[in-house]
Image (cartoon, grey):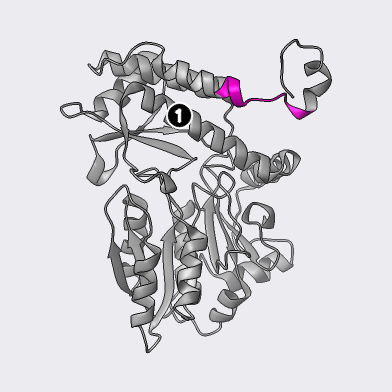
Amino acid sequence: MKYPFQSQAGKPFIFPSSGTGAWESALTNTLSPGDKVVAFRYGQFSHLWVDMAQRLGLDVEVLETPWGEGADEARLEAVLRADTDKKIKAVMVVHNETTTGVTSDILGCRKAIDTAGHPALFFVDGVSSIGALPFHMDKWGVDIAITGSQKALCLPTGLGLTCVSPKAMEATKTAELKRVFFSYDDMMKANAASNFPYTPSIPLLYGLRESIALMKEQTLEEVWARHERMGDATRAAVKAWGLELLCKNPRWNSNSLTVVATPEGIDSNDIVKAAYCKYNLTIGVGLSEVNGKVFRIGHLGDMNECSMLGAIAGVEMVLNDVGVKVPFGSGVGAAAKFFQETSSVIPTREILGDHIYGVKN
């Protein structure tokens, strides 16, 4: 499990839960009632993590941010500098907010914490980023990284996965929030005896072993590059349709998914329903504050050029069905052109590729 997190120093934990359970494990194992934490809120999932922290009895300073923007490093630094008594115990950041298609700069946030000279723990939700986007837990100074089985790991929902730094493990010795199911101590004791403190999900553990093996076979660097290409191609399609992204600043563009704003007067829920009912295509609805205003095209996990083009073609058809008259072939053509110009021969098939006229290696 250290490989997807890119950690050598961290301690991994596997909980039979969704990523929400891994959220709770991070908070309850390291913090005490009334502790102050700082969290950005710029989408449904950052909102839910804030809500959890508040309901657990933590004092949460919420940095409200427009949906479609990411973590403002300068703002974080200012908040931490102002905390001269060092009352803030942790910083919480959602790396890739799947509500909005925004990827925040985790290294930039780490630099803000360090520049402020603040000792706060650094918690990062990487549910839809780890295994899809560059993530370096140790290099970036992340104290607890969190992900789930159902995103880039290509498994069904059911595993909450986390990796914990030595600094965060030290904090568990004085943490007073109650924990039972998500206790690191209970898990370590059982793991030491090759066991779990309760019934684990055996099939998902077999799947996890295989998923990590596939990542190692391709290498994470190649996995990240593939996701970047899927994101670039999808954004090229959106541009060709004449539509806009919810994420307005390219520095925050997500390579896990693309969130598209619908034109005035078009309910994005109609797009999602029509795609499913007419073309058997599943795309994401807009959540909470952006419900009806956006739809989401996922491109993380086991995706390749042809599967991505099929999804883009389906979206192109359904846009015309609901009254968004984009030229047929515009988005598909833009994405296909990008793929054709940037694709190379699959490494394991180079011998075959050498005999294909015009194929670039």
**Image spot of residue 96 (x, y percent):** 45, 50
Residue at the far bottom in the pictured view: 85
Residue 319 position (above or below residue 12): above
- Please indicate, yes or no, whether residue 187 appears anywhere in the rendered image: yes
Say whether residue 152 is magenta.
no
Residue at the far right in the pictured view: 351
The residue to which callout 1 is attached is 234
Say whether residue 346 is magenta.
yes
Q: Residue at the location (66% across, 61% down)? A: 7
**In the picture, residue 81 is in which quadrant?**
bottom left
Residue 316 position (above or below residue 294): above
**Image spot of residue 156 (x, y percent):** 54, 39
In-front residue for pair 323/289: 323
User: Circle 1 — which element?
Assistant: helix
Residue 190 position (above or below residue 223): below
Determine whether, in the image, residue 92 is placed left or right of residue 269. Answer: right
Q: Residue at the location (58% across, 38% down)? A: 154
Magenta range is: 339-347
Determine whether, in the image, residue 46 is placed left or right of residue 197. Answer: left
**Image spot of residue 255 (x, y percent):** 49, 40
Crowd band around label 1 with a 10 angstrom C-alpha radius: few (<14), some (14–19), many (20+) = many
**Image spot of residue 135 (x, y percent):** 58, 54
In-front residue for pair 29/50: 50
- Quarter of the image that includes the C terminus: top right
Looking at the picture, which amino acid does disc 1 mark?
A: Thr
In-front residue for pair 143/58: 143
Q: Residue at the location (73% across, 43% down)? A: 213
- Please indicate, yes or no, whether residue 280 appears anywhere in the rendered image: no
Q: Residue at the location (46% across, 65% down)? A: 109
